[in-house]
Amino acid sequence: MDELNTTSEILGLTEARERLSDVRPVVEAIMHLVREQRDLQDELRERLEDESTGQLRSVILEKDTELRERIRELNLLGAVIKDPYTGLIDFYTWVQGDLAFLCWHHGEDTIEWWHGFNDGFAGRRHVSELEEGT
């Protein structure tokens, strides 16, 4: 998934927040698809001896194709998916000349957090620390 989960856009806080209305349904679709895929994979493992696994494998491939399309759609909106099960995404941004991430998690109303490039979710800091215009 990493090879397709990229974007070249670097957004400010205001622009990233404006895109959330388009991002939300895509993230929800991704979350649904990865759960569906996990359930199908579990079913496939249970039915390995069954002759009907060919059809199940075909459905899994269709879901994988749909998931990849949704991730591309998310990337075109300037976001990358960090955790498809929980709906965690990041937007690239600049913070005092360093590349960082504006962080949004499914269920949050807006983007309220950011973190350094190597800090991850645990290193999230409130956007009030950012300079105006980011």
Image (cartoon, rainbow, N blue to C red):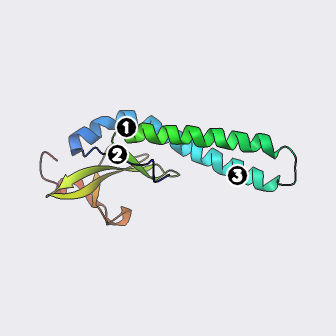
Q: Quadrant of residue 42?
A: bottom right
Label 3 secondary element: helix
Q: Quadrant of residue 36?
A: top right
**Residue found at x 29% / y 62%:** 117
Residue type for callout 2: Thr
**Residue found at x 65% / y 51%:** 38
**Residue found at x 43% / y 45%:** 107
Name of the residue lying farthest toward the top = 22
Label 2 secondary element: loop
**Residue found at x 58% / y 47%:** 34
Where is residue 28? Give x, y as percent. 50, 40
Q: Is residue 70 left or right of residue 101?
A: right
Q: Which mark is residue 86?
A: none
Residue behind mark 2: 7
Circle 1 crowding by C-alpha within 10 Å: few under 14, some 14–19, many from 20? some
Label 1 secondary element: helix
**Vertical arrangement, residue 27 with respect to residue 97, above or below:** above
Where is residue 84? Give x, y as percent. 50, 50
Residue type for callout 1: Leu
Question: What separation in Å lies between label 2 and label 1 (alpha carbons)?
Answer: 7 Å
Nearest the viewer among 2 and 91 is 2
Nearest the viewer among 126 and 134 is 134
Is label 3 or label 2 in front?
A: 2
Nearest the viewer among 5 and 100 is 5
**Vertical arrangement, residue 76 with respect to residue 112, above or below:** above
Q: Is residue 118 left or right of residue 107?
A: left
Residue behind mark 1: 76
Residue type for callout 3: Gln
Residue behind mark 3: 41
Question: What separation in Å lies between label 3 and label 2 (alpha carbons)?
Answer: 29 Å
Q: Is residue 40 left or right of residue 27?
A: right
> Which of marks 1 and 2 precedes in the sequence?
2
